Image (cartoon, rainbow, N blue to C red):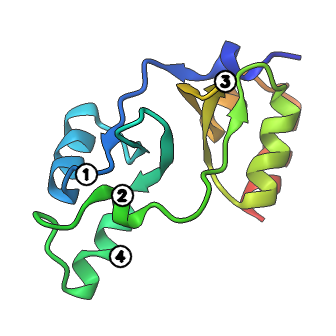
Amino acid sequence: MAKAREIMTGGVECVGENESLEAAARKMKELDVGSLPICGEDDRLKGMLTDRDIVVKCLAEGGDPRSAKAGELAEGKPVTIGADDSIEEAIRTMQDHQVRRLPVIDGHKLVGVISQADIARNYPEDRVGELVAFISY
């Protein structure tokens, strides 16, 4: 079975932990994505930021996306997968943490993101429905 590095989306761009949520939203629009990894000044992953996070945790609570920082929405230790971990390990991790995207780490370096769609494209066709059910449960 394939490893995470073989099916991930590489060349992932981060939003800096000190960048505004407005800047993060612009970057999401430019890249046509709904989430971005949050990276610290030390180039380490601090979390993941979604467009929904910006709306629910900032805008809906009356926050100002021009002054709120991406790092303020990073919660706890990010859930990741190792670059050499199997697809099965990625599925287990997604299921255990109820996430649809996993940052892929090689050592301490962010090398990509693996999504539910990445797995589905590389999973046996007759088991894709099972995959979606596992992750979305």
Q: What's the CA distance linking mark 3 and mark 4?
A: 31 Å
> Which is more foreground, mark 2 or mark 4?
2
Q: Circle 3 is placed at which residue position?
A: 107
- Residue type indicated by callout 3: Gly
Q: Circle 4 is placed at which residue position?
A: 57
Q: Quadrant of the C terminus?
A: bottom right
Q: Circle 1 is placed at which residue position?
A: 18
Q: Is residue 101 left or right of residue 65?
A: right
Res 71 label:
2
Kindly indicate the quadrant of the structure image that contains residue 128: top right
- Residue type indicated by callout 2: Gly
Percent of width and height locating residue 110: 53, 28
| Residues marked 3 and 2 touching at CB (< 8 Å) | no
Could you say which is closer to the camera, residue 105 or residue 127?
Answer: 105
Kindly indicate the quadrant of the structure image that contains residue 99: bottom right
Residue in the image at 35% along x and 66% along y: 72
- Residue type indicated by callout 4: Lys
- How many discs appear? 4
Q: What's the CA distance linking mark 3 and mark 2?
A: 22 Å
| First reached walking from the N terminus: tag 2 or tag 4 | 4
Could you say which is closer to the camera, residue 17 or residue 22?
Answer: 17
Residue in the image at 70% along x and 60% along y: 98
| Residues marked 1 and 2 touching at CB (< 8 Å) | yes
